Image (cartoon, grey):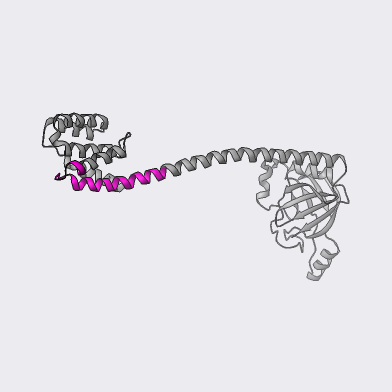
Amino acid sequence: MRHIMLALLLLSGCSGFQGKATFEEANDLFHQGNYRASLETYRHILERDPGRGDRVLFEMGILYAHPKNDQKNYRKSLECFQKIIREYPASGYRQNSQTMISSITTVALKDETIAAQQKRIETLQQEVKGRESEIAELQRKVKELEQSFFAYASRNGSAERILIEKKTRRLMLMAKGEVIKTYKIALGGDPIGPKEREGDNKTPEGTYVIDSRNRDSRFHRSLHISYPNERDRKRAQELGVPPGGGIMIHGIKKGFSWVGDSHSEVDWTKGCIAVTDEEIDEIDMMAPNGTIVEIRP
């Protein structure tokens, strides 16, 4: 496009009209951006003075292809230049007309390609919007099924096991080998590896049980995990350090429940497993004391 704009500007410089006043008028209209009126003026000149047809056709070809002409017409522009070559073999505009034909043909092909691509993009965008609606509907149905299943599980018994996967940051309530519900979690500030000693900010790894609970916790509600187990104590003894304790599944610290799901974007506990306040209410209801808690790396 830059190439044709340069060609148009340079070649239209040939219009430093020295002839009749009507040429000057057409040129003035061209530079004012009134392309339609300029074309009309050139048509009148062509009717009255066919002997200057090559010059008139050249200027009209420039106008039809000008990038700023919102009614540009590459087909009519090419017709003007082709007519000069065909009907005015000795014209001084012949060589420039050949140059313009080559440039306009290239630009027209590019414009067609761009238009086709834009149409394809618009079509794909419409398809994406349609799929977004489908996905949103599927997500709604999945959520309804999860809620229905959770309600059914709540009425018909308790979770048999809590499975925690540290790497994926998720806690799953299990019953009869099926996942009842999954929660996003936050862990201790140094989450990689098992807890070894008091104050290391690590979340334990191993098999434990829920052995007590506090429904008036500083973290809304909390379910105490039976850490340390025998293996944890032995490891701490070998290291000559206290194993620590007080590991719980709990909600968000009082006064900060407004952070909601975003709490799980960072590991902020001292080694505990954190969920939202609403989620710990559900887990508290489904996981009685004695529920097995398996914590995997």
Q: Residue at x 86, y 45 (%)?
A: 158
Residue 226 visible from this viewpoint: no
Between residue 148 and residue 186, name the one nearer to us: 148
Q: At which x and y percent is residue 25?
A: 17, 30
Q: At which x and y percent is residue 254?
A: 73, 42
Q: At which x and y percent is residue 191?
A: 70, 58
Q: For the view shown, which residue lies furthest in the bottom direction?
A: 238
In the rendered image, residue 33 lying in the magenta stretch gets the answer no
Which corner quadrant holds the C terminus? bottom right
Prevailing secondary structure of the magenta residues = helix
The segment highlighted magenta reads 85-114
- Say above or below: 69 vs 264: above
Q: At which x and y percent is residue 162?
A: 81, 52
Q: Residue at x 65, y 50 (%)?
A: 265
Q: Residue at x 88, y 41 (%)?
A: 156
Disc tally is: 0
Q: Is residue 136 left or right of residue 217?
A: left
Residue 110 visible from this viewpoint: yes
Between residue 242 and residue 32, name the one nearer to us: 32
- Say above or below: 244 vs 51: below
Q: For the view shown, which residue lies furthest in the front direction?
A: 86
Between residue 255 and residue 275, name the one nearer to us: 275
